[in-house]
Image: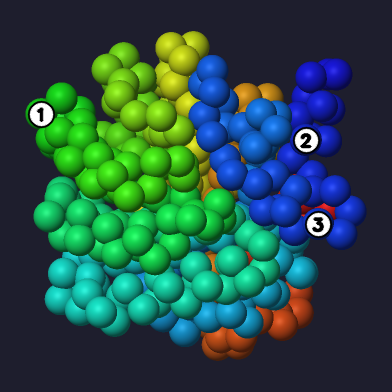
Amino acid sequence: MALALALLVMAFPAYGQTPVQAHGALAVEAGRVVDSSRRPVVLRGMSLFWSQWQPQFYNHDVVRWLKDDWKISVIRAAVAVEHGGYLDHPERETAKAEAVIDAAIAEGLYVVVDWHAHQPHPEEAITFFTHIAQKYGAYPNLIYEIYNEPLPEHGWAEVVRPYHMQVAAAIRAIDPDNLIVAGTPSWSQDVDIAAADPLPFSNLAYTLHFYAASHRQELRDKAQVALDRGAALFVTEWGTSEADGAGAFDPDETRLWWAFMEKNGLSSLNWTIADKPETSVALRPGASAHGGWSETWLTPSGQLVRDHLREMNR
């Protein structure tokens, strides 16, 4: 109990400070994400939706509202790669990422820049992250998520690890310090496999994704194996719904996941700030693209997650 309370205290910014002012540059030590004082840190926040499909929320007003009202400490820009995203419109999608990064820096938040892809595109990812690292690598706010969700057919040794070796090396050539989060096979669930054959980079964590109505104790057990192997995990995407973002809303299993993440000091971002009519989204259709949402504009998932963030990040 004392350890859990200490972790919660360490996760809270000092009064009047932004999260980045309170914690500074992040690092990985002994399988934990730590702050500039080498204290364990837990970030909690929200992910935006695929950038090509819900671009209206990629703006400073939304980031500010989530900081002030939802009390987030981290925001995630899900930069779409396929399906009409970066591969077809690189300048347009890069501009959306930059809008969120600029807002996060101005508001003192951490920002996960997510290469939101299911297929490996190492050359394009290197181009994108080289640009981001050159422009923003000096800011401690930045977190690189370099491959959102590899598919089950993308083996760790055969596809995913070689991809990360290329992309992470390109980032490290420019930015030697800021946190990198590396995706794992099977929609970023095979963290145990990655932990058994880790990447040789400092300040690197592995991506764990879950959707509470689909992923239960079996996935928590896999995560525990990875943690026991010394891997740092970062939950860059989780939902209260089934794995496709729709279907059942499962607050009870969500609370079990919250307890697991708090026990193990895992940072996390909920999916998602969007107004698409799906279970996992936080907003009802027609919600303002500039924040200011009253509770009547929140879905059941949005209400549950907002209440949790305000309680944990106060």
- Report how far apart the C-alphas of labels 2 and 1 lie in the structure: 39 Å
Q: Position of residue 252 (x, y in %)?
A: 66, 40
Count neighbours of disc 1 (C-alpha within 10 A) and say few if under 14, some if 14 to 19, many if 20 or more: few
- Report how far apart the C-alphas of labels 2 and 3 lie in the structure: 13 Å
Residue identifier under label 1: 158
The secondary structure type at the circle numbered 3 is: loop
Considering only order in the chain, which callout, 1 or 2, is on the residue closer to the N terminus?
2
Type of amino acid under label 3: Gln
Considering only order in the chain, which callout, 3 or 1, is on the residue closer to the N terminus?
3
The answer to whether 237 is drawn above or below residue 296 in the figure is above
Q: Position of residue 268 (x, y in %)?
A: 57, 45
Q: Are marks 1 and 3 in contact (CB under 8 Å)?
A: no
Horizontal relation, residue 267 to residue 237: left or right? right
Residue in the picture at 38% in, 48% down: 175
The secondary structure type at the circle numbered 2 is: helix
Q: Are marks 2 and 1 in contact (CB under 8 Å)?
A: no
Residue in the picture at 16% in, 69% down: 87
Please state which of residues 180 and 206 is positioned toward the viewer in this rendering. 180
Considering only order in the chain, which callout, 3 or 2, is on the residue closer to the N terminus?
2
Q: Residue furthest top?
A: 228
Quarter of the image holding residue 199?
Answer: top left
Horizontal relation, residue 80 to residue 8: left or right? left
Horizontal relation, residue 55 to residue 16: left or right? left
Q: Nearer the viewer, mark 1 or mark 3?
A: 3
Q: Nearer the viewer, mark 2 or mark 1?
A: 2
User: In the drawing, what numbered circle is on residue 17?
Assistant: 3
Q: Position of residue 211 (x, y in %)?
A: 47, 44
The answer to whether 53 is drawn above or below residue 144 in the figure is below
Type of amino acid under label 2: Met
Q: Can I make out residue 220 in this image?
A: no
Count neighbours of disc 3 (C-alpha within 10 A) and say few if under 14, some if 14 to 19, many if 20 or more: few
